[in-house]
Amino acid sequence: MNFIEYEIGVDMKKLPLFKAHAQDFQRSHLSGLNTSSIIATIAAVMLGTSVNSAQAGERESLEQLRSTTTNLVNLLVQEGVLSKDKAGALLKQAAQDAEKAKEIDAAAAPASTSESVDAAIDKKMVRVQYVPDIVKKQMKEEIKDEVMTTLNYKAGERLGMPEWIDRLKWEGSLRLRAEADKYPEGNPIASKFNSLNGTKLNNTTEDRNRLRVRAQLGVKADINDWMTAGIRMTTGSLDDPISPNQTQEAASGKYTIGLDRAYMNAKIKPWLNVVGGRFANPWFSTDLMWDPDLAFDGIAASFTPAINDRLSGFVTLGAFPIDEIEKSDLNQAKSKWMYGSQAGINWKFSDKSSAKFGVALYDFQNVEGISNVANGFTASTSGPFSATVPAFRTKGNSTFDINGGVSGTEQYGLSSKFRDINITGQIDLAQFDPVHIILTGDYIRNIGFDSQEIAQRTTGGDINSPLMPKKQVNAYQLKVAVGMLETYQKGQWNVFAAYKRLEADSVLDSFTDSDFYLGGTNAKGWLLGGSYGLDKNTWLTARWFSADEISPRSSGVVGEAPLSPLSVDVLMLDLNTKF
């Protein structure tokens, strides 16, 4: 056992020197002292003598010291500093004190030298005992209870506040973005591009620089042992489901805030989870199919059975309303839905590496356009099939005018149906942990594209019409990322690169990534970027997108060339925080 010793008292071997010092004192300093000072000095010396005499065994040195002290007192009498009466009283009192000290020391003395040494060590020792973990835990709980009692804490109540406060967990994020949109020379003008693509773009030729902000604030609540609920607010346009960004400008007055999360989540079994409302993406997927900010409305159930310690499976099923439409004699359109299913496996290796593979089918119901005029109705923006037009679009999907090209009534519906098979795989190599190498591959094919059906909807059955869209139904993405999995701490980093190709009718342009090509399909190109952690929960991200149109559309007029390809380059610099 370790201990600490403290040296107390006077070294008795040095006491014989006191006599010589006393003589020097007598010769050189005596004449300068007054009576009270000398008396105080003698008293201190005598007291020190009695204390040290109880601690040391050097009797000879002690007797010499007493003799020297007596001689010193007598010398003071001879010099007239002390009277004989005072000197006698002083010596008598010192003798009495010394005798009492001897009696006390004798009564308290240990039985032997060994016992005396042990007693001294024990007196000077600071002991540090081993405290078992169970005792530490008990002490912690006792301290916690004592503090809570001091704070007037009761079961289910803290300082008079209800217990549900403890079941709330707040979360939020704030992102500041500097964005530069570059349109190379040779791009088609917006009006011409819109007329052939059924879009409503404002700009395709003029570079644009802007500052943008995204703010999110939400709360999660533990309802009980198996049920949680969540609500989150975010910035962004209320009619744009894939971008929460708000362009900064004083002219806007106030930012728009909307509710993009409102859900309940039930953990029915460790391997069965059901969520309903408006919630985050439940699929194993990439931004090739779904924009990262897209919220899903509906219900989804996830099964995650464990096969063994390293291998597990997952199955996800869901039904999601896209556009709820009230059908009547004036409105023949049907509500739009998406039904999804996915199955896959997840491997974990001994060196923290992992691999994940999934196959999904996304079946979109009633998203294709239906012509008003082809079904015997008058061309009108409020015709019985006008609601078949998408509520939100970006660009890329093949379209046709459901009002037959009648001026002033143009409405563009989707030419194709969409039933997407999506195969996604990811390998995480962690041999150099914390640095990871992550390889991701994603492939999509729209098996809902049917040329005969499209011809019936768009050209009156003429499959050879120049207005018939070409069959472009494949999409894929290859991506590699190197670095840490997250950059939420200072010094963490990662870099990444990807190549994308989305043919025109491979996926719905309404839901794919809004940053690449500024949203949409019928595009191919590169993504380069990286992130760096500045401090806790604060990081920078830089990304460069370069995308070109795959197949420019033409007017269908014989001899008229197609438009030039639309190219879009985008630089984004983001300062991110989360809390």
Image (cartoon, rainbow, N blue to C red):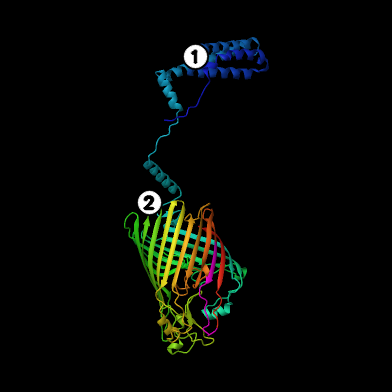
**Label 1 vs label 2, nearer the camera:** 2
Amino acid identity at mark 2:
Ser
Residue 57 visible in this rendered orientation of the protein: yes
**Camera-side residue: 6 or 453?**
453
Labelled disc at residue 58 = 1
Q: Earlier in the sequence, mark 1 or mark 2?
A: 1
Q: Position of residue 327 (x, y in %)?
A: 41, 82
Q: Secondary structure at mark 1?
A: loop
Amino acid identity at mark 1:
Glu
Q: Magenta includes 101?
A: no
Q: Position of residue 361 (x, y in %)?
A: 38, 70
What residue lies at 60% left-to-right and 18% top-to-bottom? 39
What residue lies at 54% left-to-right and 87% top-to-bottom? 407
**Camera-side residue: 428 or 95?**
428
Q: Secondary structure at mark 2?
A: loop
Which residue carries the number 2 mark? 350
Q: Quadrant of residue 180?
A: bottom right
Mark 1 near mark 2, Cβ–Cβ under 8 Å?
A: no
**Camera-side residue: 388 or 264?**
388
Q: Which residue is farthest left?
A: 307
Residue 82 visible in this rendered orientation of the protein: no
What residue lies at 49% left-to-right and 12% top-to-bottom? 59
Q: CA distance from mark 1 to mark 2?
A: 73 Å
Q: Residues within 10 Å of mark 1 (few under 14, many from 20)?
A: few
Q: Position of residue 380 (x, y in %)?
A: 49, 87
Q: Which residue is farthest front?
A: 559
Quadrant of the snapshot with the N terminus: top left
Q: Magenta includes 553?
A: yes
Segment tinted magenta in the rendering: 543-559
